[in-house]
Image (cartoon, rainbow, N blue to C red):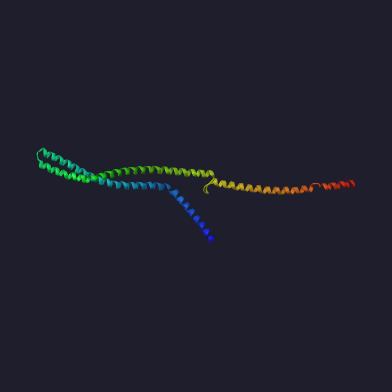
Amino acid sequence: MGFFRDLFGRAGRVARGQANKSMDVVEDATFEATLKQTVRDMKTELNNVVRSSAEAMSHHNRLEAEFRKYEQSSADWKDKAKLALDKGNEDLAKKALAKKAESDQQVAVLLPGVEDARKASASLKDKVSDLKRRISESERNAGTLIARRNAAKASKKVSQALAGVGDGSNAFAALNSFEESVRREEAQAKAFDSLSTDVDEDLEAEFDELGTSNVDDDLAALKAEMGK
């Protein structure tokens, strides 16, 4: 069980490694396209926000127009009341003032909503302007990111080439591999040469010992010569 567990564990690591490598390749191939698509999505979102904002502002404009209409009506009835008084017709002036009161009532009812709509409309304009600014900035940054990434990848390839590392297609890495192989062969040759030299030296020493005169033998020969 331990063997199979280890086998499948290594197989899983290999599979995950290949999957991650594949994802890296896909990411490299789609980085620029994905980044540009992200900017396009932001512009689409901006268009949706602009449409929603335009609807909200249109409602505010209608409310504002109605509010202005009642304000103008109040002013008109006030002028008519003045005219009636100038003509000495108080009854007509009262009727005009009654109409003015009706308009003033409508103005009072609409005023809170109009003020809220004004604030909301101003806020929407500011937010849309800020969103447009941020999207323009993001679009510029996208171009900068693409240029920086391409420069970084190129720099990485140059550094890998100079260091003799990287993928299997790296000629510098292949050359380093050949150099390492030659160094190993040279080291082995030196080792065998050293062993051979040691053997030869030992053999020569043995022959030297055979040819070296022995003091005891020399003494015996001298005694024989002298008759002793």
Label total for image:
0
**Residue 81 versus residue 20 in the image, above or below:** above
Q: Give the residue furthest to the bottom.
A: 1
Q: Position of residue 217 (x, y in %)?
A: 83, 48
Q: Look at the picture and state if 126 lies above or below 21.
A: above
Residue 24 in percent (x, y) is at 46, 50
Q: In this view of the protein, which residue sits in the foreground, 122 or 177?
A: 122
At x 25%, y 44%, the residue is 115
**Which residue shows up at 32% across the image and 47% down it?**
49
Instruction: Name the residue rendered at 75%, 47% in the picture.
Output: 205
**Residue 202 falls left or right of residue 163:** right
Q: Residue at x 15, y 44 (%)?
A: 99
Taking the image as shown, residue 29 lies to the left or right of residue 220, namely left
Q: Quadrant of residue 60?
A: top left
Q: Is residue 200 left or right of residue 45?
A: right
Position in image of residue 131 (x %, y %): 34, 44
Which residue is nearer to you in this view: 151 or 224? 224
Q: Residue furthest left?
A: 88
The residue nearer to you, when weighing 70 against 207, is 70
Indicate the position of residue 106 as horizontal and vertical percent values.
Answer: 19, 46
Q: Residue furthest top?
A: 86
